[in-house]
Amino acid sequence: MGKQLLKVVLIGDGGVGKTSLRNQFIHKRFTNAYKATIGADFITKEIELEDGKRVSLQIWDTAGQERFQSLGIAFYRGADACILCYDVTNYLTFEHLAKWRREFLNQAGIGDSNPDFPFVLLGNKIDINERVVSRRQARAFAQEHSTVTGAKMEMPCFEASAKDGIHVEDAFVYIAKTVRIPQMELDMIGNGVHGPGSAPRLDWDAESRKSKSCC
Ligand code: GDP
Ligand code: MG
């Protein structure tokens, strides 16, 4: 059985906490230092699921250039899942998600070719007591941008605090559980991630999806 290695990209406005979420997930650590350098990088983490299956997540993060310029095709291409991040205390970051989603679909070369592409919504900074984006608004966004094939599937939405380490794993584990690269495709690409230009074709694991309740 080919090993599942999923490329996961974190996108959203600068400052919403993407780097902190990844640090917390990978290292279980939060640092307040804000580092904006140029470039993008990934860190791979293997997750063992309850059924014993192992899935590696290759988590891509920008290094600050989302403030100034487009992230570039290499960042997006071959992604198997995309986490749309916003800050629950900053409404603008939530408003910009539609733009981020469009940019992702265009740059990744997915467009309309895969109406089921797995997006996950993640609102960060719930430790701060100044929420301006409600759960209801998040759900409305998720519903509006849900995928349609057969039964309408809702984009899952999560809320987290990278600072306090609350619910940070949820979105990542959800992706590891639900996104599957078909075996046939794994055989073709070996154990690597999709090459540039190959649009990801993913199967959602319908059973896992059913069991998940959103925020
Ligand atoms: P990025 O630009 O999206 O990668 O955001 P960063 O991870 O660099 O975080 C931006 C700022 O928000 C930093 O000062 C972080 O310390 C802070 N931050 C990130 N996550 C949280 C969180 O969950 N709660 C709070 N209170 N601050 C956070
Ligand atoms: Mg960052």
Image (cartoon, helix red, strand yellow):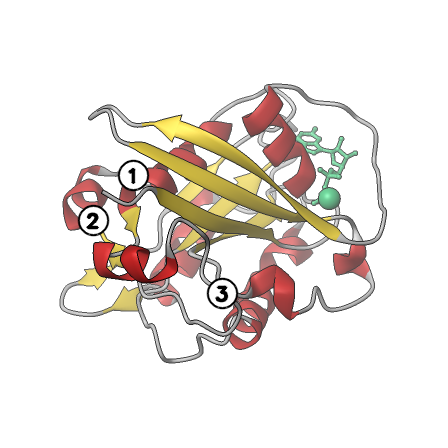
Between 65 and 84, which is closer to the camera in this rendering? Answer: 65
Mark toward the start of the polypeptide (3 vs 1) = 1
Q: Is residue 33 positioned above or below 38 on the image? A: above
Disc assigned to residue 195: 3
Which residue corresponds to mark 2? Answer: 205
Q: CA distance from mark 3 to mark 1?
A: 23 Å
Give the amino acid type for the residue marked by disc 3 in the picture. Answer: Gly
Residue occupying the point 30% across, 54% down = 181
Q: Is residue 197 positioned above or below 28 on the image? A: below
The answer to whether residue 25 shows anywhere in this view is: yes
Quadrant position of the N terminus in the picture = top left
Circle 3 SS class: loop
Picture quadrant where residue 16 is located: top right
Proximity of marks 2 and 1: CB atoms separated by less than 8 Å: yes
Give the amino acid type for the residue marked by disc 2 in the picture. Answer: Asp
Picture quadrant where residue 54 is located: top left
Proximity of marks 3 and 1: CB atoms separated by less than 8 Å: no
Which residue corresponds to mark 1? Answer: 177
Proximity of marks 3 and 2: CB atoms separated by less than 8 Å: no
Q: CA distance from mark 2 to mark 1?
A: 8 Å
Give the amino acid type for the residue marked by disc 1 in the picture. Answer: Lys
**Residue 159 at x, y percent in the picture:** 48, 36
Horizontal side of residue 163 vs 47, given as left or right? right
Mark toward the start of the polypeptide (2 vs 1) = 1
Q: Is residue 185 positioned above or below 32 on the image? A: below
